[in-house]
Amino acid sequence: MILKKIDRGLYECFDDSYNHYMIEDSTREKTMYKRPADLKGGEWKWGIYEQEGAEWIYLDGNPTMADCLEVINTLQAANEYLR
């Protein structure tokens, strides 16, 4: 997995299968991606977004960055299993 810091609270991630994700801190002043309207800021701090075509789609929210990376590893393992 490759993780690159883009800005404070914003990271770009590529898994071993070259799937592209962004991980964003929900407390950033200027957020880059749409958050689900039904989530409150206290429920999660970090959001995971996956690129589908030209759009970034919300996948999951977690309290820590480490939890986000674990989710991405789990998604990669599931994708490999399904191949």
Image (cartoon, rainbow, N blue to C red):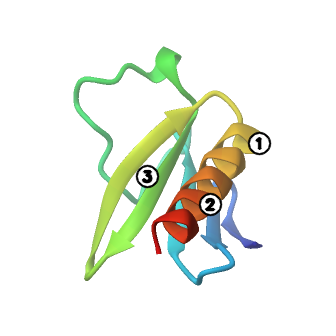
Residue closer to the observer: 57 or 18: 18
Q: Foreground mark, 1 or 3? A: 1
- Residue at 62 percent across and 51 percent down: it is 74
Q: How far across and how far down the image is residue 56, in percent?
A: 33, 66
Q: Secondary structure at mark 1?
A: helix
Q: How far across and how far down the image is residue 5, in percent?
A: 73, 69
Task: Determine which residue is flagged by label 1.
Answer: 66
Left or right: 57 in relation to 10: left
Left or right: 27 in relation to 53: right
Task: Determine which residue is flagged by label 2.
Answer: 77
Using the rendered view, name the quadrant where residue 66 is placed. top right
Q: Secondary structure at mark 3?
A: loop
Q: Secondary structure at mark 2?
A: helix
Task: Determine which residue is flagged by label 3.
Answer: 31
Identity of the amino acid at label 2?
A: Ala
* 25 to 19, vertically: above or below: above
* 53 to 56, vertically: above or below: below
* 35 to 53, vertically: above or below: above
Q: How far across and how far down the image is residue 28, in percent?
A: 55, 44
* 6 to 38, vertically: above or below: below
In which quadrant will I find the N terminus? bottom right
Identity of the amino acid at label 1?
A: Ala
Q: Earlier in the sequence, mark 1 or mark 3?
A: 3
For disc 3, the neighbor class at 10 Å (few under 14, some 14 to 19, many from 20) is few
For disc 2, the neighbor class at 10 Å (few under 14, some 14 to 19, many from 20) is few
Cα distance between the residues tagged 2 and 3: 29 Å
- Residue at 46 percent across and 66 percent down: it is 82
Residue closer to the observer: 65 or 70: 70
Left or right: 41 in relation to 76: left
Q: Earlier in the sequence, mark 1 or mark 2?
A: 1
Count of number-bearing discs: 3
Q: How far across and how far down the image is residue 69, in percent?
A: 70, 51
